[in-house]
Amino acid sequence: MESIWFATHPLTTTPNDDFVEGAHVDTVVAGAGLTGLTTAVLLARSGQKVAVLEARRVGAVTTGHTTAKVSLLQERGVAHQTRDAWTYAETEPAARQLQGELDACRAAGLDEAAWTAESELPFPIAGALRLPGQAQIHPLEALEALLSEFTAHGGILIEEARVTDASSKSPVTITTTRGRMTAERLILATGTPILDRVVGRSDGTSQALADLIAWTERHFSGAEHTHAWSAQDYRSVDRVPFVGPLPRGGGRIDVATGYNKWGMTNAVAAALNLSSQILEGQTRWADTLGHRRSGLAGAVDTVKANAEVGMEMTKNWVEAELRAVPGEAPAEGAGLVGRGEKGRPEAVSTVDGATCRVSGVCTHLGGVLRWNDAERSWDCPLHGSRFAADGTLLEGPAVSDLPRLS
Ligand SMILES: Cc1cc2nc3c(=O)[nH]c(=O)nc-3n(C[C@H](O)[C@H](O)[C@H](O)COP(=O)(O)OP(=O)(O)OC[C@H]3O[C@@H](n4cnc5c(N)ncnc54)[C@H](O)[C@@H]3O)c2cc1C
Ligand code: FES
């Protein structure tokens, strides 16, 4: 499935450099989404020599598949539209939750936030929250503008170079699928889920899409279905983005993730926070992002999240071991995991007439994969890694492909 952003604005930018084995730069940024490119621009503006290493292509993951409400990027002349932001509640319990959001808006000084029971929707609501004057952007136009400024400042973009390891010594040695390079600092702007996941534990993406289309047709007759896509974003245990030094990174490796589906603004805030720390500037308003919290509530949540991951892992291994992989090829667009010849989970799928057999075990920490019938990919229910039907890694935290079995 192709997102509306790639369909309407395919990126024409190409990598401006090739990988040079052993090259040294001030900062390597891993990941060319909104976080990575904004951070890279801010550092390059200050005169730093910066290389962005992108595992796939610019915008390939969440930024290219977002809904892109709200932006702080107008300095580069990226077109934007101003819209009121609406959140609707259909039930009384949901309306009570939404009232809490209104209270939070007021506490944050957003006095223009307003409650209403009226709406133009063709179905009844229990209440709605309106915040006027918000923005929406085309995320790929934003990335293109950032990239053009980055390269104008001498920044280096290398695509199809996945970071697979890094030392925490000085300088940091960064191992990639294209070779090694060194840097004074490494920033992981990869969306890597060292955190709890928001989406992706559900089965049947196609069914979810079908439900959404049916709901839209029921309430908005005549609506035309033009694009559909799916993506995932991450959240931290305490819901505050995780921005700052990576634990055991020797103070030289930083990470920025956990925006909980509000990355258009949080990615920019994270980039401002990280770049000001590196350049020894001041962004006090963004300090909350850089503070790690370890209170009891957070710990309880962590235990619960880990227990859920453990349950998921056991259940999926048992399920996979109970049924043997069938000899015949799955139908077009279908995939399944079962017990292979050596007793380990094997994943078999048919896409565009090609049947592929790959290991059914995620190369990150051994989760048993599930077929995503909408994206036609193998998705790991534990921490969100995704692989193409032929086993090629699409999204981490895994850093290697699935072994091919035939
Ligand atoms: C369906 C959906 C709707 C959303 N809607 C909104 C919205 O309306 N408003 C809003 O504010 N936010 C929204 N968000 C959230 C927002 O889109 C994300 O938080 C934001 O795009 C994350 O940007 P990022 O740069 O951190 O990550 P990404 O865009 O995922 O970029 C990470 C990059 O790192 C690369 N990478 C990964 N691993 C490696 C590696 N090992 N080495 C090198 N490169 C690597 C990836 O290929 C990728 O290009 C939404 C998210 C989703 C899923
Ligand atoms: S086991 Fe962690 S992503 Fe698969």
Image (cartoon, rainbow, N blue to C red):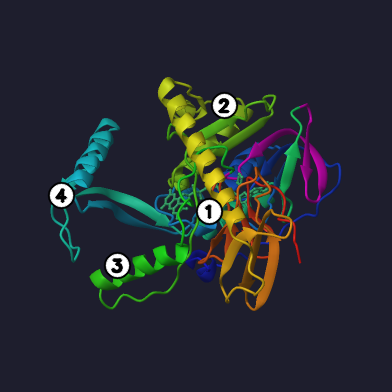
222 in the magenta segment: no
Asked if disc 4 is less than 8 Å from ligand 1, the answer is: no
Mark closest to the chain's N terminus, 4 or 1: 1
Write down the region rendered in magenta: 169-191
Q: Classify the position of the C terminus by image quarter.
A: bottom right
Instruction: Identify the image quadrant of residue 50.
Output: top right
- Element under label 4? strand
Near-viewer residue (201 or 397)? 201
Query: Does residue 358 show up?
Result: yes
Q: What secondary structure is the stretch in magenta mostly built from?
A: strand
Residue denoted by label 4: 116
Mark closest to the chain's N terminus, 3 or 1: 1
Mark closest to the chain's N terminus, 3 or 4: 4
Q: Position of residue 60 (x, y in %)?
A: 60, 58
**Disc 2 from disc 4: Cα separation:** 42 Å
Mark closest to the chain's N terminus, 2 or 3: 3
Residue denoted by label 3: 215
Residue drawn at (76%, 32%), measured in percent from left and top? 167
Badge 3 density bin: few <14, some 14–19, many ≥20, Cα 10 Å: few
Q: Where is residue 183 in the image (x, y as percent from the top left)?
A: 76, 35
- Element under label 3? helix
Near-viewer residue (285 or 222)? 222
Badge 2 density bin: few <14, some 14–19, many ≥20, Cα 10 Å: few
Say whether residue 162 is left or right of residue 233.
right
Q: Between label 2 and label 4, give the one nearer the viewer.
A: 4
Q: Disc 3 residue type? A: Trp
Residue drawn at (80%, 54%), measured in percent from left and top? 18
**Disc 2 from disc 3: Cα separation:** 49 Å
Residue denoted by label 2: 281
Mark closest to the chain's N terminus, 2 or 1: 1
- Checking the image for residue 329, the label placed there is none
